[in-house]
Image: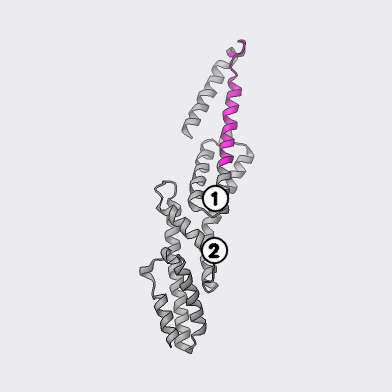
Amino acid sequence: CHSIINQLKVLEHARKELSPRLVKLPGGLNIGKELQSVKTKIREILEALVEIFSTHYSKMNFEGMGVSHRSVVLLSSQMEVHLTSLNKRSVKDLRKQFDRAVNSVTRLLDRFVQSGFQEDAKLHQIFPSLQKASESVNPELPKLSKTYEKSQKELTEKINKAFNICNDIVSQSNCYYQPIEMLTALDRQLKRGLKNHLLTSELSFDCEAKLQEWREE
């Protein structure tokens, strides 16, 4: 990015200083044309980065989104004066999409718990992606590292709360059907890999052991 900026400055300076003389020479260098060519290239690079982000967004690949988002933000902020209104709108839309993707994680966790821990392919897609982003040494991903840590804590707390409700139902009504159904669904999700993304030391119960206890009652 800085290299491109420096090239633009050199070309801009050369255009101002030399263009009046060069146009008088046969086959003289057209610095204005060269300058425009560089600006066009910048816009093409930006749109390519936006397209890459969109691909990662459609797959909820948070690591890819984080890197692409950062690249677009840096390039657009340094080159804003050379961007078209369409370029600027693309950058604005990308920022909104990225924030929407990050904010969607909490809503997804809520839906998962409210459904009684029923199957959710997105959940098993998003958590590994966030984990990978959080483990990356890429300095562009600190926000996603915090998002992953927050999501781990939120899901652990929501599961504990749901278990307390189930436990209360059993204690107050001696009815096991619904609690067993919910914990069976949760146990299935944990074994599918969800357990790897919880703060297991903060779980208030052992899902498999509690299921066995309730089934034997």
- Residue placed most toward the observer, 125 or 160: 125
Quadrant in which the C terminus is drawn: bottom left
Give the percent coordinates (x, y) of residue 32.
60, 22
Residue at the disc numbered 1: 56
Query: Residue at the spot x=48%, y=81% of the render?
Result: 180
What residue is shown with label 2? 121
Q: Which residue lies furthest to the left in this view?
A: 201
Quadrant housing residue 206: bottom left
How far is mark 2 from mark 1, CA to CA?
A: 17 Å
Q: Vertical placement of 81 versus 196: above or below?
A: above
Residue 43 is covered by the magenta coloring: yes
Segment tinted magenta in the rendering: 22-48
Q: Is residue 178 left or right of residue 204?
A: right
Color style of the picture: one colour
How many residues crowd mark 2 within 10 Å: few (<14), some (14–19), many (20+)? few
Which residue type carries mark 1? His
Query: Is 34 on the left-hand or right-hand side of 179?
Result: right
